[in-house]
Image (cartoon, rainbow, N blue to C red):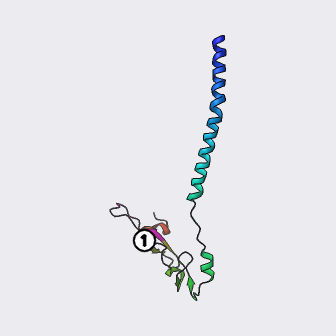
Amino acid sequence: MKSLFSIVISLFTFMLFVGPAAAQFENIFQNLFRQQQQHQRPAIPKVSDSYYQSDCDKYLCQDTLACVATPVDCPCLWPDSQIKCILPNKKNYVCISRPAPGDPAPRDCAFVNKAYKGTV
């Protein structure tokens, strides 16, 4: 009976000292990760000012702010790493990542057209 009592007292004493320390570490880690999450949020560019102050008399592309004749003439946002694929309706386009060199099944504009038609 005495040994059970001493075990219970030992456990209680252990929890008395370890509990607050564990709670403090949990609080530290939560704050640390919360700060990392706040720093990882991408900055939202203020495009609206540039968009509304543009002198474009044709079509102003929403993502690049290029002034073009028609929406389908808009360039890709990252032309060095993207391919512009005009869809079969000739009114819309999508920009896709350029395939990696040596990719056994590269996705290109032919793939996009098949996907548009639902044959993929």
The total number of labels drawn is 1
Q: Nearer the viewer, residue 113 or 21?
A: 21
Which residue lies most toward the left here? Answer: 102
Q: Which residue is mark 1?
A: 109
Residue 16: within the magenta? no
Q: Is residue 14 above or below residue 49?
A: above
Front-lying residue, 104 or 52: 52
Report helix, strand or loop for mark 1: helix
Q: Quarter of the image for the N terminus: give it.
A: top right
In this picture, residue 45 sits left or right of residue 93: right
Question: Is residue 6 placed above or below 69 in the rendered structure?
Answer: above
State the predominant SS element of the stretch in magenta: loop
Residue nearest the observer in this picture, 68 or 54: 54
Q: Quadrant of residue 71?
A: bottom right
Chain part drawn in magenta: 95-106
Identify residue type, mark 1.
Answer: Cys
Residue 113 on image: x %, y %? 45, 70
Which residue is rendered at x = 64% and y = 38% of the image?
23
Residue 70, horizontal then vertical, whole percent = 53, 84
Using residue 69 as the reference point, say whether residue 98 is left or right of it.
left
Is 53 above or below relative to 10? below
Q: Position of residue 55 (x, y in %)?
A: 59, 87
